[in-house]
Image: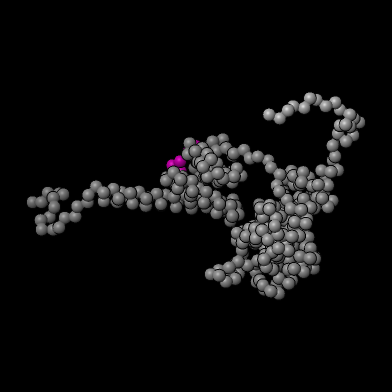
Amino acid sequence: MKMIGEPDAGKPQVRFDEGVQETCLRRRACALLYVLVTHLRKMMLEELQRRNYSQTSVTAYLKTVEDFANHFHKAPDQLGADEIRSYQVYLLKEKRLGVRTVGHRTAALRFFFCKMPKRNYPVEEVPYPKAPRRLPNILTQEEAARLIDSASNLFHRTMLMTLYATGIRRAELCRLKVEDIDSKRLILHIRRGKRSRDREVPLSPKLLETFREYWRWMRPKTYLFPGTKDGWRADKPITAKVLWEACREAAERAGITKPGRPHWIRHSFATHLVEGGADLPTVQLLLGHSDLKATSIYLHLSERHLKAAGTPLDKLEVSGPEQVKRSRKLPKK
């Protein structure tokens, strides 16, 4: 009578050495981890969609949590405050990412650990890195004209003119449709901007003339600036990378040493409006800002306002520098 576990006589027996067993266990663990991460990803996607986050935010949030998990080779729900703390230091010190970029990734981690169902995570455990307040670089009006004239083709020129004439965000420009142009009212409709807000901006006659010439050449169907698929034009929006490259190439051709970035053209649009006499609430509406505080930064960039403010020193009656006693001049060492 054969005992349980006793090999059958005459049948070849398969033996697994320790290395093979370890490989099988590792594969099984990876498969279980994949199922767990996939389930968490689906839950997070549903939570983001339930709150009506934009597609750009959804993609960025999911990618951030995925990178966070891959960095520690664990499922994200198995990580905690210590891992978040070291990951933030890693992004800032080793990867040398900008403070605002790390802030965006922190927002994604906060969402995952604080908003996911059945999780009670203290918000103070995931602090935002303190961002320095810096004034953005802007183009002069002469540089803006050179930038537009230095576009490599009509496609790039039309995009750059749209950026400067409307102050539109790059994501909003990528999603512009032909039907958003109201040539009778000279209005450009911006649909589902930041925080899913719609707004209208004036349409410059110069820009409308360029739009008409551009349409006769490109013949776009749905999206005003169609992208490509397999090297051919397709009825899909362009990516932000195309716009970045158009700005960079035009800045290089124009001999502008400032880095060519689409958002700097938006800053230039707002600053030139303020210098031209536009009031802040109007600029706020055109830019789509929800808070006037964000628009007030352009007062610091407006040359007209800076010169009009003057300085209290100009009102003082002080003696000239030629009447002041000189101190002993120190010899050079």
Q: Position of residue 204 (x, y in %)?
A: 79, 63
Q: Nearer the viewer, residue 190 or 165?
A: 165
Question: Against 50, is 110 above or below?
Answer: above
Q: Is residue 50 left or right of residue 25?
A: right
Quarter holding residue 297: top right
Question: Against 206, is 115 above or below?
Answer: above
Q: How is the image coloured?
A: one colour
Q: Main secondary structure of the magenta part?
A: helix
Question: Against 179, is 169 above or below?
Answer: above
Q: Position of residue 163 (x, y in %)?
A: 71, 59
Question: Which residue is depicted at the point 44% across and 52% down?
Answer: 38
Whether residue 275 is visible here, answered yes or no, is: yes
Q: Is residue 321 left or right of residue 192?
A: right
Q: Nearer the viewer, residue 77 or 279?
A: 279
Q: Nearer the viewer, residue 179 or 300?
A: 300
Whether residue 120 is visible here, answered yes or no, is: no
Question: Against 129, is 233 above or below?
Answer: below
Span of residues in magenta? 77-81
Q: Position of residue 12 (x, y in %)?
A: 15, 58
Q: Is residue 15 left or right of residue 165?
A: left
Q: Position of residue 42 (x, y in %)?
A: 48, 53
Total numbered labels placed on residues in the image: 0
Furthest toward the right, the residue is 317
Q: Is residue 239 magenta?
A: no
Question: Which residue is depicted at the point 63% across and 40% down?
Answer: 131
Question: Which residue is depicted at the point 65% across and 39% down?
Answer: 132
Q: Is residue 269 left or right of residue 156?
A: right
Question: Which residue is depicted at the point 80% across and 53% down?
Answer: 273
**Which quarter shows the C terminus?**
top right
